[in-house]
Amino acid sequence: MKKKNKLTSVLIVALVLPVVVMEPGCARGGFGGGGFGGARGFGGGFDRGSFGGDFDRGGFDRGGMGRSDEFDRFNDSFDHPGDSAFGGNNAGIRPGENGVRTFADGRDNLAADGGFGRIMDSPAAGWAGRAGTYNMSPRALADRWNAVNGNFNHWNYYDRNWWNNHPWYWNNRYWGDNWAWGWTGWGDLGAWWGMDVASDPVYYDYGNNITYQGDQVYYGSQPLESADSYYTQAQALASTAPPTPSAPMSDADQKKTANNMKPLGVYALVSGDQTNSSQLFQIAVDKKGIIRGTYFNEVTDESKPISGAVDKKNQRACFTIAGNKNVVYDTAIGNLLKESSPILVHYSKSNTQQLTLVRLKKNSSNS
C-alpha cells in the first residue's frame, strides 16, 4: 500500500468519519470485564491494553464507511447467483432466477442462496448499500427482532419429524421437540464453562468497538489487526472443532450424551433492512465451547451441519457451514445470547459483510 501524505490522510479522515460522542462507560457494553485481555491470538485474546475502560471513542465511529462507491462490493464480489453459503453450485436455484424467491404464503425477497448473492442488489430488500461495519442502535435491533419474528411461521422446524426428513448425524433422539428452540442464559452457560458470570459476556458492537476501515480492523480508536489477519484468526478458530460425525451414534451413546450440549437457539440471518429470511441457523455449544448446529435454507430445503468454536478467553465465536471452510461466521458469545445482534460474515480475506442474527422465539402461541 502506498503511503499518503500525513496532511492528506488527516483531511480524508476528517471528511469521511462521522463524529459521534459516546458517553463514558460505553465500553462496558462491548468488551467490559477484560474481554480482550491477555496475549494476542486465541491463547488469550487480543492484547491492546486496558481498552475495557471508559474511553471516549469520539470520532472513531466509522458507521458511515462503505456508503461510497469506493466500498461498494455488491456488483462484483457478491454477484454469484447459484452459489450457496456452503459453496458449490446450488441446484435449488432455478435457471434464470436472480437468487430471490417468493414463498406461496406471501413472503417475498427471500434469498435463494446462503451467500445472499443477489438479495443485496435488490431495492426491495432495503439493503442500505453498506460494506464493512456499521453501528446498529438497540432500538433498531429490537425492531428487527419484532419484524422478523412476526413474519416467521414455520415453528414446526427442528422437531423429531423435521429431523427425520433432514438428517445429519449430530441430532440426539433424547432431545425433546422444542430443545433446539430453547436458549441458555449467561449465568447457566458461563457457570457450566467455569467462567466468572458476575461480569457480562463479551459483546461485539460493530461500528463502535470493532470497526473495519479499509484493510485495517480497529478496536475503539486503536488498530487491532489487519483485515487479513482478523479473517485468518476467525478461520483458525472455527477449524478447531472436531470433524462432524459421519454416522449416527448408537442409542446408548445418544442417551449418555443427551446433556452434553446446551442450545443457544434458532436464528434467522438477515441483511440490511430485511424483515424476513430463508436462511436459518440452529446453534448449540458443548462444555468445551465447541459449536454444533444446522444451517437450513427454507427455499431450497437444503440443510447442512455447522461447526466451530468459542475461544473462552476472548469469547470470540466463529463457525462455518459444511462444504466451505472459507466463508466464516464471526461474532462473540455475548452476541449469540442476545435476541438480535450483528454478525460478521467473512466471504474471503478481502470481503467481509455485517449482517444480523435474529433469534426466533417459539412459545405456546406459535407451537
Image (tube, rainbow, N blue to C red):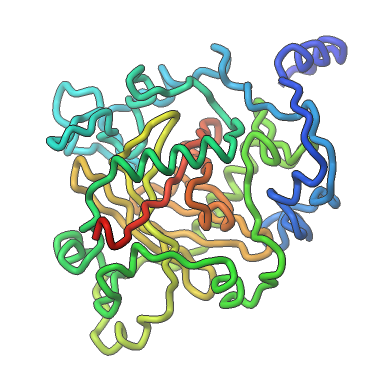
Farthest front residue?
Answer: 365
Vertical order, 95 against 289 (above or below): above
Q: Give the residue at x 17% y 38%.
A: 92
Q: Quadrant of the C terminus?
A: bottom left
Q: Exactly how many numbered labels are in the figure?
A: 0
Residue 131 lies, with reference to residue 301, above or below; the image says: above
* Residue at point 55%, 49% (across, down): 331
- Picture residue at 80% right of the left edge, 30% below the top: 58
Viewer-side residue, 147 vs 81: 147
Query: Quarter-wise, where is residue 117 in the image?
Result: top left
Q: Is residue 340 above or below residue 192?
A: above
Task: Give the quarter of the figure containing the N terminus.
Answer: top right
Q: Position of residue 177 (x, y in %)?
A: 25, 70
Residue drawn at x 37%, y 83% is 257
Position of 188 compared to 170: left or right? right
Q: Nearer the viewer, residue 269 or 346?
A: 269
Would you say 67 lies left or right of 279 here? right
Q: Is residue 33 left or right of residue 315?
A: right
Q: Quadrant of residue 74?
A: top left
Give the quadrant of residue 313. Answer: bottom right
In the rendering, at what x and y percent does residue 7 appear?
A: 87, 11
Vertical position of residue 183 compared to residue 105: above or below: below
Residue 336, image x, y percentages: 51, 55
Of residue 198 and residue 62, the one placed in the foreground of this image is 198
